[in-house]
Image (cartoon, rainbow, N blue to C red):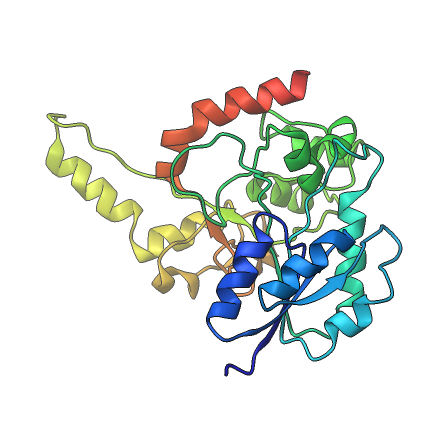
Amino acid sequence: MNQNKIGIIGCGWLGLPLAKEFVSNNYKVKGSTTTKEKLEILKNEGIDAYLIDVAENSISNSFESFLYELDILIVNIPPKIRKDANSNYSEKIKELVKQANKVKNILFISSTSVYGSMQGKIDSNTIALPDSENGKEILGLDTIKDSTVWWESGAQPPQLLADGEVVMTTAYNGRVFNAIASEGKPFVINWDGQVWDLDLWVIPKGAPNQEATMDFVKFSTSTKALADQASWIPYGPLRKSSFGLVSSFHSDPSLDMAPHMPTAPANFTRALQNDFEFWADNSDQLNERFNAWLTK
């Protein structure tokens, strides 16, 4: 008998088969339902059944005994917006996680898709753009639309910050650095989860001066050239050999550029690389869906 004890909140059409699969693999399983009639069904499947109702500010009293000795808690309850439009699903989940804070492993699953009708492989890097009310509730997209400014050019974010129109923004780090170093703006960059991209040199097939072109590419991507470039704008360098040569800002010798590099070790811990292939395959579809949501 496997000693791991698993609890599943919400033994519906997805949670119940999952619970049965665990039972068949000799796990001790606790399962919850919101209807008394279903308690017997769970018991007949070898599931320790509980009647639990999750509200925004409270959970039924049996929840404490449900959590007792659990190693893993699986949360599988739907938003049910069509049944209760005033229900705050996000707050329910927060309350549940707060009360279950002693459980070491908590896993949230849902049959409600936050990826709309997207086809193909979906993973943790896939951008979620739901087209159902349940999916939107999970992400809370509609709750932020009216209080969000959508910028279209790189010059806008630092200007929006300077004018006090926004309190935080996504931005190109070079633009923000320039506002800090050259204009004295009191901005701070949060590098956690930064999205990094590559600039590329491309030599068209059949282009003239191939030898001179290759010499230029070799020079421009060399250790020293990349380090020198970083004294003018905090982009790169991509070469590890360049980083130790990064010096001060070209117009202010007292300003060390190394801590402002996206590739500085402290800034690069949780960086995400832009996925060229994903956007090549999905940009048109996602832009169309995003604009439709934005204008409705």
Q: Position of residue 230 (x, y in %)?
A: 46, 50
Q: Is residue 95 left or right of residue 156?
A: right
Relative depth, front residue between 45 and 32 = 45
Q: Is residue 219 left or right of residue 277?
A: left
Q: Is residue 269 visible?
A: no
Relative depth, front residue between 89 and 280 = 89
Q: Position of residue 160 (x, y in %)?
A: 73, 31
Q: Residue sitting at 50 percent across and 27 percent down?
A: 286
Q: Position of residue 270 (x, y in %)?
A: 53, 59
Q: Is residue 35 above or below residue 169?
A: below
Q: Is residue 50 visible?
A: yes
Q: Residue sitting at 52 percent across and 69 percent down?
A: 23
Q: Is residue 9 above or below residue 180?
A: below
Q: Which quadrant of the view contains residue 174?
A: top right
Relative depth, front residue between 16 and 40 = 40
Q: Is residue 103 above or below residue 152?
A: below
Relative depth, front residue between 72 and 251 = 72
Q: Residue sitting at 61 percent across and 64 percent down?
A: 44
Q: Position of residue 52 (x, y in %)?
A: 79, 59
- In which quadrant will I find the C terminus? top right
